[in-house]
Image (cartoon, coloured by chain):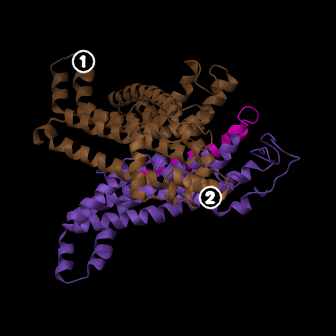
Chain colours: A brown, B purple
């Protein structure tokens, strides 16, 4: 229990620090926040009105508390470029990104564990070499370039999948592969090394000697014991996947949170930047905490200590 | 020597070394390799397919893609170098301090490192870019920051290991200054994991900085930077597909080189614990 509490504490602290950093963005950038909110070319009196109505003349601490209070009530402010409430847009974009991340994660987990197990079972054969090649290339290729190549081959040349958007289920295929490729590589490597370690353990050797059927040895005994590090890796990867969504979504013009963030940065739409960063960071911290929790549940040694 | 022989017998590591050599040669000899100036636009010869005078073709502004790719190696070398000096330097310093002094110094520093490490570098970079504004400089600072915890963690663990050696105790007894002990006795003995991390970090930072260039918040869109070139290429994916091929290939080969070398070094030096 102590372990979980400690983790929870540090998650809350990190979240607090990040929220302060994100809040301060508007004050750190060069220029007067009131002028930025008022927009370019606003008259001096408009800027003053904005300063008064938004409370920018008050102490920073008061402003921060106010901002946070708003966030908790779902009030992320008003977008500078669309002049609309941020929350509704943010919510749809968030769901879109979550959807894409889940598909990408599913692809990475299924193929990653599959490839990893195969390459451990056929250690030092052509299968092993092939999956290690996939793994090392998977972490070396830029995500967005993979996306562009996929579009060039499967959308433009062969015309199987749509180039952009998220209208039909077909349009999810390429972005999911693109966003998941990196994680697939990492999961494959982890599964392989974890499986290789377990396969050398005495109880596996014994199981083989006892004449148990091979598939049951590998999938029931070995994989189960190899799972702890793999699950930790998967959990970490899910967070990274949501971070990597920025690049994938830009390639496929997918209406998600990552694309929204990049568009907002380019438009200098600071309330929208703050809102999307806050959501991404929060999700990330929550996922990391859940991974720690899973690690704790799966690892009996930690449980008995706590 | 044994390490070197082991490294050279690893085919993949050698391949990685060749890729890196190719990259360095392009970066150093760029003006002699190329015949065209990438910054010169030739609106009479736009979107020329690869072959002939322009072996990689030209882009929508008539710039020679081959020159862009070769000069891009220079930009990338600069990026990697800056990240290693900045991120590596700070990370090593933090790692040494935490490992040597222990106690609350270690707890505080390592907590901060853990939290930084937990975020994907691209997300940290985007936070930075929103504050500092777009540009190569903010991209490099942001990516360096993301590399700091990786160096700090490995340096700390090797410092803790080295600290318990007798020669460190001897130096302490002899009354040498802590500064001397840290930088003359401890750091040189923990250099191997740092070199491996440097190789991997070089590749990673290249991926992220070029990613920022691709998003249009990194390097100047008109400069010879691989990510920025790909961002340009995305606009013409339908009509001029060759634009997307070469800069991407350049990034992939360079990063692959550094990753293969890093893995090879790890095997050759027989270091597992990170």
Q: Which residue lies at the image location 16% right of the left edge and 28% below the top edge? A: A203
Image coords of residue B255 (percent x, y)? 53, 48
Above or below residue A100? Residue A24 is: below
Image coords of residue A187 (percent x, y)? 38, 34
Looking at this view, is B171 or A180 the one in front? Answer: A180
Q: Is residue B200 visible?
A: no
Looking at the rendering, the stretch of residues picked out in magenta corresponds to B234-262
Above or below residue A119? Residue A82 is: below
Which of the image's four quarters has the N terminus of chain B? bottom left
Q: Which mark is residue A85?
A: none
Above or below residue A149? Residue B200 is: below
Image coords of residue A293 (percent x, y)? 24, 36
Looking at this view, is B59 or A264 the one in front? Answer: A264
Q: Which mark is residue B75?
A: 2
Q: Both on one chain, marks 1 and 2? A: no
Q: Marks 1/2: CA distance?
A: 53 Å
């Amino acid at each position: 229990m102590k372990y979980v509490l400690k983790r929870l504490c540090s998650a809350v602290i990190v979240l607090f620090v990040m929220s302060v950093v994100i809040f301060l963005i508007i004050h750190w950038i060069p220029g007067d926040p009131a002028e930025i909110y008022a927009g370019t070319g606003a008259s001096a009196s408009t800027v003053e009105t904005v300063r008064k109505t938004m409370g920018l003349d008050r102490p920073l601490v008061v402003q921060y508390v106010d901002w946070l209070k708003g966030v908790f009530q779902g009030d992320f402010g008003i977008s500078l470029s669309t002049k609309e409430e941020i929350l509704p847009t943010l919510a749809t974009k968030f769901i879109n990104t979550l959807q894409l991340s889940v598909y990408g994660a599913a692809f990475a987990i299924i193929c990653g564990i599959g490839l990893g197990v195969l390459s451990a079972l056929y250690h030092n054969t052509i299968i092993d070499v092939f999956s290690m090649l996939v793994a090392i290339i998977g972490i070396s290729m830029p995500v967005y370039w993979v996306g562009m190549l996929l579009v060039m081959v499967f959308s433009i040349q062969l015309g199987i999948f749509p180039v952009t958007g998220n209208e039909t289920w077909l349009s999810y295929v390429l972005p999911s592969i693109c966003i998941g490729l990196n994680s697939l590589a990492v999961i494959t490597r982890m599964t392989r090394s974890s499986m290789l370690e377990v396969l050398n353990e005495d109880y596996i050797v014994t199981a083989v000697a006892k004449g148990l059927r091979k598939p049951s040895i590998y999938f029931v005994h070995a994989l189960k014991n190899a799972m702890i590090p793999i699950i930790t890796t998967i959990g970490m990867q899910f967070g990274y996947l949501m971070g990597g969504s920025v690049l994938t979504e830009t390639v496929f013009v997918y209406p998600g949170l990552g694309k929204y963030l990049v568009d907002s940065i380019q438009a200098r739409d600071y309330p929208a930047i703050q809102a999307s960063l806050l959501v991404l960071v929060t999700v990330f911290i929550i996922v990391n905490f859940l991974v720690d929790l899973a690690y704790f549940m799966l690892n009996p040694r930690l449980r008995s200590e706590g | 020597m044994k390490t070197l022989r082991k490294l050279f017998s690893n085919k993949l590591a050698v391949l990685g070394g060749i890729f890196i050599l190719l990259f360095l040669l392009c970066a150093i000899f760029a003006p002699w390799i190329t015949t065209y100036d990438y910054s010169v636009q030739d609106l009479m010869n736009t979107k020329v397919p690869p072959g002939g005078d322009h072996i990689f073709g030209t882009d929508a502004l008539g710039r020679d893609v081959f020159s862009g790719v070769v000069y891009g190696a220079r930009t990338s070398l600069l990026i990697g170098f800056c990240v290693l000096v900045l991120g590596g330097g700070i990370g090593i310093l933090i790692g040494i301090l935490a490992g040597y002094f222990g106690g609350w110094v270690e707890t505080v520093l390592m907590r901060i490192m853990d939290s930084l490490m937990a975020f994907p570098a691209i997300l940290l970079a985007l936070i930075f870019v929103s504050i500092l504004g777009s540009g190569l400089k903010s991209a490099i600072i942001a990516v360096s920051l993301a590399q700091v915890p990786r160096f700090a963690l490995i340096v700390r663990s090797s410092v803790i290991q080295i600290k318990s050696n007798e020669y460190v105790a001897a130096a302490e007894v002899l009354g040498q200054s802590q500064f001397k002990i840290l930088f003359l006795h401890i750091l040189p003995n923990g250099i191997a994991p740092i070199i491996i991390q440097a190789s991997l970090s070089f590749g990673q930072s290249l991926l992220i900085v070029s990613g920022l260039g691709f998003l249009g918040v990194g390097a100047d869109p008109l400069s010879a930077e691989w990510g920025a070139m790909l961002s340009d290429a995305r606009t013409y994916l339908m009509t001029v597909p060759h634009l997307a091929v070469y800069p991407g290939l350049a990034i992939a080969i360079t990063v692959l080189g550094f990753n293969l070398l890093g893995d090879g070094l790890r095997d050759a030096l027989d270091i597992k614990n990170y």
